Amino acid sequence: MVQQAPAVTAPEPIGLGSLKLVIGCGIDATLADRIGTEIAPHVRADDVRRAGDAIIVYTDAEPGQIRDWLAPALRDGESVLVVEFERWSSRGDAVDRTWLLRRGH
């Protein structure tokens, strides 16, 4: 008896966009969480990943637009850097390589 292969479901379509790295600079340990909270209304939850204290976002928003979304989360002495990039390299399972590959090259 031959068993049928399990059904394969297509991954959810990904919209247009590019990867952005969002880095918060400050001494408060909650900064990355606050940044994540401010990004949430603008980007699908599946298009956001934490990478240590940084956040990787897949969106068609411009870096300056993301910076403006985050302004309310920043306290005195804190800053944010948003970098758009098209080339990347990773090693190890701590970074969600499959997620990155679906959104990059």
Image: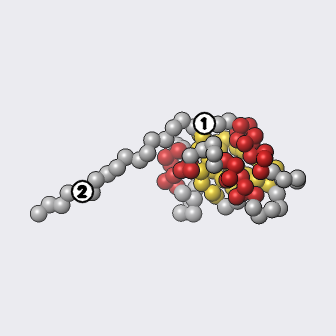
Residue 86 picture quarter = top right
Q: Where is residue 66 in the image (x, y as percent from the top left)?
A: 70, 41
In this rendering, does residue 87 appear at all?
no
Residue 42 picture quarter = top right
| Residue furthest left in the image | 1
Decide if residue 32 is on the left or right side of residue 105: right
User: Which mark, by number, is residue 19?
Assistant: none
Q: How is the image coloured?
A: secondary structure
What residue sits 57% from the left and 59% below the top? 95
Disc 2 to disc 1, C-alpha distance: 37 Å
- Tag 2: Cα neighbours inside 10 Å, few (<14), some, or many (≥20)? few
Mark before the other along the chain sequence, 2 or 1: 2
Decide if residue 68 is on the left or right side of residue 6: right
* Count of picture labels: 2
Q: Where is residue 48 in the image (x, y as percent from the top left)?
A: 59, 51
Residue for badge 1: 60
What residue sits 27% from the left and 57% below the top? 6
Is residue 36 placed above or below 60 in the rendered structure?
below
> In the rendered structure, which amino acid carries the disc numbered 1?
Asp
Residue for badge 2: 5
> In the rendered structure, which amino acid carries the disc numbered 2?
Ala
